[in-house]
Amino acid sequence: MNRRAFLALARTGPARTAVPTASIAPYQQPLTRDDALHLLRRTTFGPTLELVEQLVGKSAEEAVALLLGNSASEPPVPSPGQWVNQAQEDPRGVDIVTRGQIEATWQSNFRNLQQWWIDLMRTEKFPAREKLTLFWSGHFTTEFTYDLGYIPPQVLYRQNLMLRRMRLSNFRSFLEEVTLDCAMLEYLGGTLNVAGKPNENYAREMMELYSTGIGWYTEGDVKEAARVLTGWKASLYSDAPAPNGLFNTWFKPSDHDIGAKQFLGLSIPARDQDTNTEYLVRTGEVRRMIEILFGQRAEAIARFMVGKLYRYFVYSNPEASDAEVLAALMDIFVANDFELRPLLTTLLSSEHFFDPANRGVQIKSPADYVVGLARQMGVSLPGAADALARMEQDLIDPPDVSGWREYRTWISTKTLPQRVQYVQQLIASLADTQAQEFVRSFDRWQSVDSFVAELTRFLLPRPVGTNRLSYYTSVLLAGAPNYEWPAIVNNAQAVGTRLRALLRTIVKAPDYHLC
Amino acid sequence: MRRRDFLRTAAALTTTAAATQIAGLPVRASSPLLSLPPQVMESDNVLVIIQLFGGNDALNTVIPAEDDEYYRIRPTLAIPKSRAWRWLSTDLYLHPSLAGNGLFGGGFGGLMDQGRLAIVQDVGYDNPNLSHFRSTDIWLSGINSSDPFVRLNEGWIGRYFARVLPDFPTVLPSHPLCVQIGGTLSLLFQSAKGDVGIALSDPQKFFELGRGSTPDEEPLPETDAFAREFNYVRSVAAQADQYAQAVLDAYNRGRTTVDYGSRGLPAQLGMIARLISGGLRTKVYLCYLGGFDTHVQQQDADEITNGVHPSLLAQLANGVALFMQDALQQGFAQRVVGITISEFGRRPYENGSRGTDHGAAGVQFVFGDGNSIRSSRFGTAPNLHELDSNGDLIYQHDYRRLYADILLNWFDATPEDTAAILGDRIAPLNVIKRRTVTSTPPLEPTDSSLMIVPNPVGTTGELHVHLKRLAPVSIDVYNLRGQFVGEVFHGILPEGYSRLPLPPLRVGSYLLQLQSGDCMLHTRFVVGQ
């Protein structure tokens, strides 16, 4: 029997429910090993044996609290380097040689920034901040390479810190922060949005992509929102004005439209020159507009954001039977005044989240796939920023303002072979002694059958059938009889070769691309 | 009877006999009738789609140079009449960056002169959506849903192949059906049965990476979401493996006879030319040119051929002109037609940043050999005096009309398939001509004549049809945007004159279409008070 035919017999593991039936009620049982693995697969870039041990036996709520952390009182992330505080001139105003130097510096600093973030994803333990920060980075998109050139990486770094800090905050306040974020002002034409010549770019996306979704406002509302947002500037360059300091936002009263605005049926009164100040415009117009948006379109915002978070953390393609769960989550979001923490806590510690039908159904992003292997095997990630870009997940530089389409679109005939090849290179970098140590970190490693069963349970999202287990065992033993396994493990070189061969096989399996 | 209808009938007739005669030998489970490939798989017609992402500014592409209003609403961006390229003595003017240097000088001006380009004015749909993403999805899916919650999960090309290839994806064609140059696979090539296309940017790399990527694990029975996602990943990996060799072989065999350079749209078109030349039997190619979202400084203040938008136009025109020249020199020009798509045009009024904001109706280009397309301008210059409530252009042509051309005329789909794929009955614009040779067309255009009496029609009207011989016909009324309005007659008409009543119609202008097999006739008429 060839290995294909052999595996054809394997098919599925045990029968399980076809659609999720569990509700949003809290998951009561103490977490089993499989529960902990599932929770870690969805909220981090991959479980490690150490983190699994810490969660087993805890209640879902305790585990989620540990994972989410408390953004108000957590240690700062380490800085990527000196460059984050050094400004360059505006490259559009200098000669071509200087321009080339500035942009080359930015390119290199930007790669440094991406690698810095990937290392945070790879090394973080509890709290697990990065998966949610990546969600917000994909939601409140900003591209390093945009129509007019580059957004300086210094402000992209600051935006990334802001996303991490605000990740569990009140969504209304979050949107206000984003609206006046330096990088965002530059990215979506905010700095060009001046009285008499409104630029609608951000105003439209604020609703279409960042809060309500399309269909909840008129073109008139877009125009009026653009007028509200006139006058804001970003200090991006060493030769640009910086009344509030470098890499900060400031307000230029003469560029602000002081006339009255009508937004979503409510009015924002006109002001005179005396009240045309940064503080009063921010509170009386920008904040007021966002309050109107949340007041008039609460249900749309809840639907849009709950749907998006659900697709990110539970399943990308919710079925009709999930409607009740989504509706209950929307109620929780609105009842808690758009606070994100109670929403996420409820979702991630619910029976629904742990429903067997929701396990292993999510397609891994390139970051999940690549960083996950590095976390699980304890290897580093050389050139990962470029590798992720080749897999179409160029961090902080999505293809356009709507961000990545994610899920199934991560997998194409172009990107799928790319990710497998890169991860197989990582596997090749796994040292013999590392492999030996890895095998011995499993409790029952001395039995080859137990080891393979435990390994697949650790690496794959659902149990695999006995035929697949036998096949993987045969790949691992490479012809040696079962009883020789402990001796193989005692020989670093022998176990290294064999473990790497098995890992190369497993990372190609369709369910290794799922989590 | 069409050739393939004949084949289907013949196959059906012989099946029973053949199956009984070979009793004892393995008989295929699927019926030969179903496994007979559709016409599209037998023909070697190729479609190239160029997606201009960001919303191309139609009014600074094809210039309404004879309308003073254009110069009033575009004080800093308008192209002076003296600088625009004029087609013959018509009111069709092109941006000089798009026109190139006239005949054989490259550019769309040259292609117009050679009869290898068609221009479709004011293409759009109802309730224009000004979001790049929703509108792109509307264009790629071929479905204009006014409900924002309707998720558009399938492309019209994906739906087409999923519909006409009943065994897909259990049985994969030996060459990829669709190829996208670069990027994440487009919605255009997605279907409920899986992707009908592959994405690649470098055939050598595609081969090295894809070879051997078929997973060891077999597909799962699709009982739940896990199995569906598992099988999805598995089928993509299997396609990467299966097509790796076919693509590389074609690439290595193929050649180009012009210099496409190594960047941008021309390089993408060069890759397509090389794959076609090397014998890849792919039906649809997609390439992509972004950067059309020109809110700010779309054109230099002092020189209209410099700046973002003019450069993009030059890239488009140069790429297509090179491709057509290459196709002619290599002898595959008659097999290829191309169209451009863009999610919307831009607002007629320029904004304050020397740019333009999102608009509605846009312009489409069709390129191909003179035997494959009718080279002309379709529709009139945009009407800048009657805009919609948002200040945007009102469309003249439903955006699915060229899709109907492609399905009916280029891929030989049936009218039923076409209506099912596009969600509505859409009249083809007939920019693209039929190329497939069929055995016995039931009618030639000279066989019949159409007359509406009276025209304009009052409270009642009649259609007078004259046929030289008995024929099955379908006669329908469409509005001038190409959308179906009502049926007149479906059935067999006798030789000679027939008089058929028209359905009740509101005041307006209409298009009457008679279709019989491969023959299609149109006449326009007006319904008055």
Image (cartoon, rainbow, N blue to C red):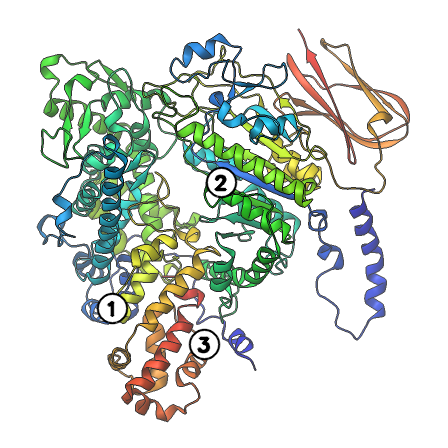
Q: Is residue B125 above or below residue A116?
A: above
The chain that hosts pointer 2 is B
Q: Taking A140 as reference, is B362 left or right?
A: right
Choose top left, top right, bottom left or bottom right for residue A473.
Answer: bottom left
Which of discs 1 and 2 lies nearer the camera? The answer is: 2
| Numbered disc 2: secondary structure | helix
- Residue B193, position in %: x, y? 56, 53
Which mark, by number, is residue B265? 2
Direction from residue A164 to residue B423 in the image, left or right: right
Residue B130 in sight here:
no
Q: What residue appears at the point 86 percent right and 32 percent down from the top-left corner?
A: B471
- N-terminal of the pair, mark 3 or mark 1, is 1
Instruction: Please state the chain letter of the residue tagged with numbered disc 1 in the rendered image.
Output: A
Question: Is disc 3 surrounded by few (<14), some (14 to 19) or many (20+) residues within 10 Å?
Answer: many
Q: Which residue is mark 1?
A: A48
Q: Amino acid at mark 3?
A: Arg
User: Which residue lies under the disc numbered 3?
Assistant: A468
Three-letter code for the amino acid on which mark 1 is drawn: Thr
